[in-house]
Amino acid sequence: MTDLAREYGEGLYELCEEENLTQEGLQQMQMLKSCFKEQPNFLLLLSNMAIAKEERVGIVEKTLRGQVHDYVLNFLKILCERNLLHEFYGCEEAYRNLYNQRHSILEAVVTTAKPMNDDQRKKLLQKLNTMTGRSINLKEKVDAALIGGVLLEMDGKRYDNTLRHRLEGLQNILSGNA
């Protein structure tokens, strides 16, 4: 994330915070992020310098008016006017990071060899809540190559308790590479 994206994303957050709209803003930024990923040509169109700036801003206005809060709409129009729509994903990340920080939420990614069941998910969330003292926003991934166990990434750290990792360690010991 660039400093510019951080500045813009945090600026939108601060504006939304003044009106108690931070959760709505977060949901709309995440919805837009999903839409832009599903329709990358839309962002390319809005970033096309061959189209007049006023026309690109008009497309944003016509497409999103009534779909998102005016703060989010105006934010996107400013990015479009300043030819900064390529910074949107970083802005969304900055907004989300500040939201999580202010609401004591920690994002975590857990990767397992097969999907977790509800009981496993509940136990993991309880353990992480107890360990961190924060609410956990858990994203789940599945990678059969792990064979078994859990790979957890949170707060910039990686906790690898997978069978694949243990077997690699054992292999290194047996081959004298440990």
Image: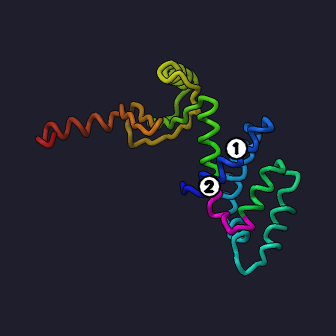
2 or 1: tag closer to the N-terminus: 1
The residue wearing badge 1 is 13
Mainly helix, strand or loop, the magenta region?
helix
Q: Indicate yes or no whether the magenta region holds residue 16.
A: no
The residue located at (56%, 25%) in the rendering is: 134
Rendered image quadrant of residue 26: top right
Amino acid marked by disc 1? Tyr
Question: Quick one: quadrant of the N terminus?
Answer: bottom right
Q: Which mark is residue 89?
A: 2
Q: Position of residue 132 (x, y in %)?
A: 49, 24
Q: What's the magenta region? A: 80-90
> Residue at coordinates 59% horizontally, 34% vertically from top-left?
101
| Lateral position of residue 15 relative to residue 1, left or right | right
Q: Is residue 22 left or right of residue 120?
A: right
Number of other residues with Cα within 10 Å of mark 2, as a class: few under 14, some 14 to 19, many 20 or more: some
The percent coordinates of residue 147 (x first, y second) are 37, 37
Does 2 appear above or below 120? Answer: below
Image quadrant assignment for residue 96:
top right
The secondary element bearing badge 1 is classed as: helix
Q: Kindly tell me whether residue 161 is visible in this rendering.
A: yes
Above/below status of 65 relative to 99: below
- Residue at point 79%, 70% (across, down): 56
